[in-house]
Image (cartoon, coloured by chain):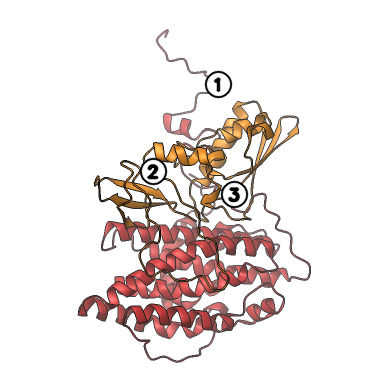
């Protein structure tokens, strides 16, 4: 994963700054889907990305945005590759990304639950961790729906300020 | 003519809509030509793995996801609440994504180079390898939740084992799918409990749904010869080995829902895996494939 600016070449800087189409307050670097950017000379760049969800419909838009940004920066030959493993996790959203989500009124994800040995347990009870309201900070929040406008978001309501809000689901 | 907007004459497309489609840029207009979901992924066959068998197996798993996704998509504009509509569409989208990856893997494994569209849209019903559970027509919401619980519980157990597959592409698709199926199963389980432990009528509906789905359960654990060969080769999971986990999860959910298992045969043949389907799949595919069949190779 490209994480620090000094490790990036110029193409890496351009790719890292491309905005996510669904959460445009985040860059692709903030979202943690940018795995590798390699300049091979002669204006050629190979970018490797990891999908957030198997069916994320934004992937084609992300590919096109990356190609357009790199072409605009003077790279004539841009190849976008997919890395499926290890699978993306919300733990790859860095501190900067979490701050930007919160500033936009979207509750950032908590740490993804580590996988215990044995079969994946069924969760029949209420959700274990309630996110704090991004508007007033209250911990008195309730889940309205596990599924929101995009695969990565759930819908919540604050019982203190009564505002609804979105939460990026831990995965 | 001095008032003419400054458009370079050589670059000017025929009309404003075409201008959005310049250079096939998917940022401005949706259409055909999705990017291969395995672009840049190493799809070479692991040593000793039979490409035809691996392709057939990926079609089985991909068709399960594609056909189940279609049944869930049919709930769009029919779900009882907006939240459930969104939930069902989200789950359908995850399964469609899994189907795309698995069909693309099938096309690379058998050497035919068929892409996901060719496999989804241009095969006849007898060439589909999905289990019959996926193709059964939709009933009411109780039926939908019973079927989704059974499907997600079985598929989660299956993909969890495939994370150790000797085919690295299959293992990677499975590792992603496990995370998604875990919340699909939680969603369906939550509704089965709510309906089963709800009113007399909600209980009756979900039990009736479970009873309709239950005869399709034994097929999930019957091995097709392709599955047996690939399980021996460390590529596939033996379906029979999933039964204990499936039973334990169903027992836990049904107990919380105060429901009991419908009476059933415990074993049955692998029908769908061999291409033996019901009329329901033919009708489903007529709709799913209609545009691609009517306009072969169309682009828009």
- Chain A display color: orange
- Which residue occupies the extreme left position in the image? B200
**Local crowd size for mark 3, using a 10 Å CA cut-off: few (<14), some (14–19), many (≥20):** many
Instruction: In the rendered view, tell whether residue B166 sits above or below residue A66.
Output: below
Asked whether, in this view, residue B194 is left or right of residue B72, the answer is left
Q: Quadrant of the N terminus of chain A?
A: top right
To which residue does mark 1 refer? B10
Chain-order first, disc 3 or disc 2: 3
User: Closer to the camera: disc 1 or disc 2?
Assistant: 2
Residue B103 visible in this rendered orientation of the protein: no
Q: Is residue A17 left or right of residue B169?
A: left
The residue lying at 67 percent from left, 58 percent from top is B113
Q: Pointer 3: what residue? A: A50
Residue drawn at the location 43% of the way across and 15% of the way down: B5
Q: Which mark is residue A106?
A: 2
Residue A169's tag is none
Name the tint of chain B in the rendering: red
* Relative horizontal placement of residue A42, taking residue B211 as reference (left or right): right
Judge by depth and name the residue closer to the eye, B144 or B178: B178
Most extreme residue toward the right, as rendered? B47
Question: x and y percent of residue B191 in the render?
Answer: 33, 70
Q: CA distance from mark 1 to mark 3?
A: 38 Å
Local SS, label 2? strand
Q: Residues within 10 Å of mark 1 (few under 14, many from 20)?
A: few
Q: Position of residue B122 (x, y in %)?
A: 54, 62
Q: Secondary structure at mark 3?
A: loop
Residue B54 pos. (x, y %): 67, 70
Picture residue at 36% right of the left edge, 68% below the top: A125
Q: Chain of mark 1?
A: B
Res B190 quadrant in image: bottom left
């Amino acid at each position: 994963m490209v994480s620090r600016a000094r490790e990036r070449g110029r193409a890496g800087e351009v790719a890292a700054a491309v905005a996510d189409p669904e959460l445009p307050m985040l860059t692709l670097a903030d979202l943690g889907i940018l795995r590798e950017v390699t300049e091979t000379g002669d204006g050629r760049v190979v970018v490797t990305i990891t999908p957030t969800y198997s069916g994320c419909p934004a992937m084609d838009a992300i590919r096109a945005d990356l190609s357009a940004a790199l072409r605009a920066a003077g790279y004539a030959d841009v190849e976008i590759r997919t890395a499926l493993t290890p699978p993306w996790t919300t733990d790859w959203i860095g501190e900067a990304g979490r701050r930007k989500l919160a500033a936009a009124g979207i509750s950032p994800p908590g740490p993804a639950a580590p996988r215990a040995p044995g079969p994946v347990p069924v969760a029949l009870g209420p959700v274990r961790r309630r996110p704090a309201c991004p508007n007033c900070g209250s911990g008195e929040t309730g889940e309205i729906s596990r599924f929101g406008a995009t695969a990565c978001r759930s819908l919540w309501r604050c019982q203190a300020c009564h505002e609804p809000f979105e939460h990026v689901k831990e995965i | 003519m001095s008032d003419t907007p400054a458009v370079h004459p050589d670059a000017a497309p025929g009309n404003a809509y075409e201008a959005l489609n310049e250079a096939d840029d998917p940022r401005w207009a949706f259409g055909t030509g999705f990017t291969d979901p395995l672009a840049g992924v190493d799809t070479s066959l692991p040593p000793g793995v039979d490409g035809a068998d691996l392709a057939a197996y990926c079609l089985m798993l991909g068709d399960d996801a594609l056909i189940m996704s279609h049944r869930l998509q049919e709930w769009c504009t029919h779900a009882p609440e907006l939240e459930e509509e969104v939930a069902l569409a989200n789950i359908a989208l995850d399964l469609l994504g899994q189907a795309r990856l698995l069909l693309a893997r099938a096309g690379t494994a058998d050497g035919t180079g068929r892409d996901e569209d060719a496999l989804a849209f241009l095969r006849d019903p007898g060439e589909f390898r999905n289990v019959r559970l996926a193709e059964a027509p939709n009933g009411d919401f109780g039926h939908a939740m019973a079927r989704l619980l059974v499907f997600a519980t079985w598929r989660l157990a299956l993909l969890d084992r495939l994370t150790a597959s000797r085919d690295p592409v299959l293992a990677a698709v499975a590792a992603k799918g496990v995370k998604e199926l875990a919340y699909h199963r939680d969603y369906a389980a939550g509704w089965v409990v709510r309906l089963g432990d709800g009113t007399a009528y909600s209980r009756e509906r979900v039990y009736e749904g479970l009873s309709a789905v239950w005869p399709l359960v034994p097929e999930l654990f019957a091995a097709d010869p392709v599955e047996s060969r690939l399980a021996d080769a460390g590529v596939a999971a033996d379906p029979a080995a999933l039964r204990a986990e499936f039973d334990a999860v169903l027992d836990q959910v049904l107990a919380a829902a105060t429901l009991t298992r419908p009476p059933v045969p415990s074993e049955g043949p692998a029908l769908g895996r061999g291409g033996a389907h019901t009329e329901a799949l033919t009708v489903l595919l007529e709709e799913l494939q209609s545009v691609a069949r009517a306009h072969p190779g169309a682009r828009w």
